[in-house]
Amino acid sequence: MKLKKLVTAAAFATMALAGCQKANIDVDTRPINGSASGEVSGVWAKGSVHEIKGDIIIPEGKTLTIEEGVTVLMDATAKPEVIVKGNLYSLGTDVNPVKFTVSDAYRTDANKFGKLWGGILAAPSCAELVLDHTILEYGGNTTSDASTSVKMGLYKNKAGENLPALWFSNINGKLVVQNSIIRNFQEDCTYIQGGKIIFANNIFYTTGITGGEAMNFKSGCLADVAYNFVYSCNTNALKLSNAGDLKPQAYIIAYNNTMVNTGWRRPTAKGGSVWLETSVHADLFNNLFTNTRFGIKRDPKNLEDSRSKNDYNWYYGYDQTTVSQFQVGKNDVVAGGTHDVRGTTAGQNDPKFVNYPLDNPMTSPDFNTSWDFHLQGNSPALGKGTTGFTRFYKTGIAMSNGITYLSPEPATYIGAYGTKL
């Protein structure tokens, strides 16, 4: 399922004008390819390559628009950070995504968990950030006292922190991450501290050495999280928390997501699939848990908001250990609704993926791009979901560049993918 975009005539005019601008970079201002460090803004033109030699900063009040097919090539020696104080729109397409990456020589198994550049770090002054059809890979460097983010007091504001692929921190801001891939990062993929948010149709895999969530939401977030696929993240696919006591209270609506093999590489209380804590308001429907460690789980000392709901979720475990950990009454697993499909025996409720070996080792972070997690036509998970709930952004999040992003309609199947068209 793809998100629908409403693009006004004004937006087309704005984008056409922007396409004529040069990228404002302090090293090389050629309109096509260039190298950059320091302040950047303007437009990086379709298909261009930009070698990032040092930390780059989008200044407050400025915008950087990255057009389809752009490669943002990070210097693996400099390990640059991308600091967003203004606005960032990374606008790839299905055929020509934007890619934040490193040179081929560094894309090796030895660098599986990245650490070769920082991440995209959006300061509280960042009003709008869009990652659409964008690939983030091989980042998550550890901060030092010399890091720009530490000097600016951003993220956790100290040395020794493993940077996420994306940090966003404006409770009044707008954040859309859709149709994108985050892979090969050392720890968290995303760490979100506020905003009006859509996360939809994304893929997360090969992330987290000793910790790390795929999607980590804190207080101040009002988020629709739908049709995301998470494979074998070290800790949770979704960590949902009201930590930080920002206003508004964190309220996350997560539906039609597929999680496979999550949590097994962090064998602690927190390693699992969905973790609820600290008065978060969370509604979870139509989610597919396949060979994940635990189901929806809570912090017993810091409970979620009592208004939280979960139902119409589907659980499959290849072995008895996995199935036993899904059971309510054990391991602080949260009780679901009457429409959950949980089972008690290994192998029950096979979702019938088109192409995935269900006995694949649960502790392996390695992802095979030939796997296909669509449902077969005879899948029992078809028709078992619900559309009877309200999401935040049915009418969309309107950006100042003229594009409005809608959160997708829920489906009656379970998980991120129905049958192949």
Image (tube, helix red, strand yellow):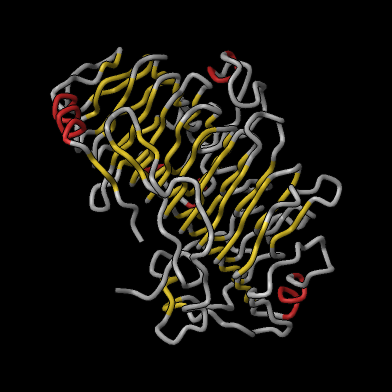
Q: Residue at x 64, y 84 (%)?
A: 347
Give the answer, above or below, for where 171 lies relative to 281.
above
Q: Residue at x 49, y 59 (%)?
A: 229
Q: Check the picture and name the quadrant holding the C terminus.
A: bottom left
Q: Residue at x 33, y 36 (%)?
A: 90
In terms of image quadrants, where is residue 18?
A: top left
Residue 102 visible somewhere in the drawing: no
Give the answer, above or below, for where 176 lies relative to 300.
above
In terms of image quadrants, where is residue 132?
A: top left
Residue 297 drawn at (x, y percent)? 74, 58
In the drawing, does residue 294 fall left or right of residue 72?
Answer: right
Q: Nearer the viewer, residue 384 or 25?
A: 384
Residue 250 drawn at (x, y percent)? 64, 40
Q: Residue at x 33, y 57 (%)?
A: 2
Q: Check the picture and name the quadrant holding the N terminus.
A: bottom left
Residue 413 drawn at (x, y percent)? 47, 73
Give the answer, above or below, for where 107 lies relative to 365.
above
Residue 158 visible somewhere in the drawing: yes
In the drawing, does residue 173 fall left or right of residue 245?
Answer: left
Q: Nearer the viewer, residue 15 or 234?
A: 15
In the drawing, does residue 289 fall left or right of residue 304?
Answer: left
- Considering every residue shown, the one lying at the far right of the view is 301
In the drawing, does residue 344 fall left or right of residue 34?
Answer: right
Q: Nearer the viewer, residue 298 or 105?
A: 298
Residue 53 drawn at (x, y percent)? 38, 23
